[in-house]
């Protein structure tokens, strides 16, 4: 029996990890990464930083990460002591703790030593995995409460769960490319949307080439998710899992919103305050989309059909 206390703890970890990710995105967008100089964990050699916008944003990010890290550790220890016979829950709680530690260490390294944009983008990618793990723990706890985690009577063929994992990996690459663009400060490489600098295909070099590649990759991701939805919706295999269909609907809606928010980023680029909001919205949609695709991939693998599919 999963207690209300444990579900509350799981929710706190998830919301906390989400706030950590958004705080990190805010640090990047406001250029506050050096707000505390090259000191860590102190801020410019002080426990309480100077009252500048950059230092307060950076230090707040560190404080939130520290508090959430404690919550994540408590969640893992509780899972280990009370629910370790549930390997899935232990894996999600352990994954959240591991990725939280890794992202904290990467954040400290970025403060102490200058990092390349490719490495900084990976920091966001690790945060994404931490949020997804924490969300999966919340979902698992509610499914256990409702009794929907019992072995299903139906299964999915190999091509479904192979496609689910392929889309998951591809989505991670698309999100990483977006984070790389952000750290390269190449957002303005394509002015206008959906055209890039007034062209269907711009010069494929420099900032315009990177941003255009991200747009094309996002469009391909939409097509992949739409195709996956059609396969699951049509029920091309026996007794299709309604849970996968629900997840596919969520993913299709989210990827559509993600592409739309990308267009808003370009339109609002000249308005600093609105641009900050649309940028955070873009990050939120990307995070939730990745988490939903993670759940789809894991559930499709758990319910896979091991033997070849029979037509009888």
Image (tube, rainbow, N blue to C red):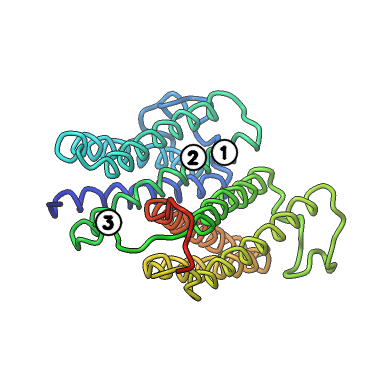
The disc label shown at residue 126, or none: 2
Query: What residue is shown with label 1?
Result: 122
The secondary element bearing badge 3 is classed as loop
Badge 3 or badge 2: first in the primary sequence: 2
Q: How far apart are marks 2 and 1 (CA)?
A: 6 Å
Can residue 257 be seen by looking at this rendering? yes
Q: Which residue is at a point 21% across and 39% down the rendered structure image?
A: 79
Badge 3 or badge 1: first in the primary sequence: 1
The secondary element bearing badge 1 is classed as helix
Q: Residue furthest front?
A: 312
Q: Is residue 295 left or right of residue 231?
A: left
Near mark 2 (Cα within 10 A), the count class, few <14, some 14-19 or many ≥20, is many
Can residue 284 be seen by looking at this rendering? no
Q: Which residue is at a point 30% across and 56% down the rendered structure image?
A: 139
Query: What residue is shown with label 3?
Result: 151
Q: In this view, does 268 lie to the left or right of 190?
A: left
Give the image location of residue 51, x and y in percent.
Answer: 43, 40
Give the image location of residue 19, x and y in percent.
Answer: 39, 50
Marks 2/1 in contact by CB < 8 Å: the verdict is yes
Marks 3/1 in contact by CB < 8 Å: the verdict is no
Marks 3/2 in contact by CB < 8 Å: the verdict is no
Q: Is residue 312 left or right of residue 222?
A: left
Q: Residue furthest bottom?
A: 234
Q: Which residue is at a point 57% across and 52% down the rendered structure image?
A: 166
The disc label shown at residue 54, or none: none
Q: Which residue is at a point 46% across and 71% down the rendered structure image?
A: 249
């Amino acid at each position: 029996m999963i207690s209300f206390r444990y579900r509350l703890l799981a929710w706190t970890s998830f919301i906390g990890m989400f706030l950590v990710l958004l705080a990190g995105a805010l640090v990047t967008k406001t250029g506050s990464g050096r707000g505390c100089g090259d000191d860590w964990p102190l801020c410019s050699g002080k426990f309480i930083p100077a009252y500048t916008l950059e230092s307060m944003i950076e230090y707040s990010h560190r404080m939130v990460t520290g508090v959430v890290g404690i919550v994540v550790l408590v969640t893992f220890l509780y899972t280990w002591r009370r629910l370790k016979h549930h390997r899935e829950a232990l894996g999600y709680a352990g994954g959240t703790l591991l990725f939280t530690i890794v992202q904290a260490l990467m954040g400290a390294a970025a403060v102490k030593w200058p990092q390349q944009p490719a490495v900084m983008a990976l920091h966001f990618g690790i945060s994404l995995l931490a949020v997804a793990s924490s969300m999966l723990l919340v979902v698992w706890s509610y499914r256990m409460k409702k009794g929907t985690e019992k072995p299903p009577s139906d299964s999915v063929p190999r091509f479904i769960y192979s496609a689910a994992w392929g889309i998951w990996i591809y989505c991670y690459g698309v999100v990483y490319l977006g984070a790389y663009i952000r750290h390269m400060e190449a957002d303005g490489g394509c002015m206008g949307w959906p055209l890039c600098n007034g062209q269907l295909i711009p010069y494929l070099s420099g900032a315009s080439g990177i941003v255009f590649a991200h747009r094309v990759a996002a469009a391909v991701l939409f097509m992949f998710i739409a195709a996956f939805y059609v396969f699951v919706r049509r029920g091309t295999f026996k007794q299709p899992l309604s849970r996968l269909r629900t997840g596919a609907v969520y993913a299709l809606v989210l990827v559509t919103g993600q592409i739309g928010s990308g267009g808003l980023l370009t339109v609002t680029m000249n308005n600093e305050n609105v641009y900050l909001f649309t940028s955070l919205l873009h990050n939120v949609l990307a995070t939730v989309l990745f988490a939903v695709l993670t759940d789809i991939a894991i559930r499709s693998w758990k319910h896979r059909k091991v033997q070849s599919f029979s037509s009888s």
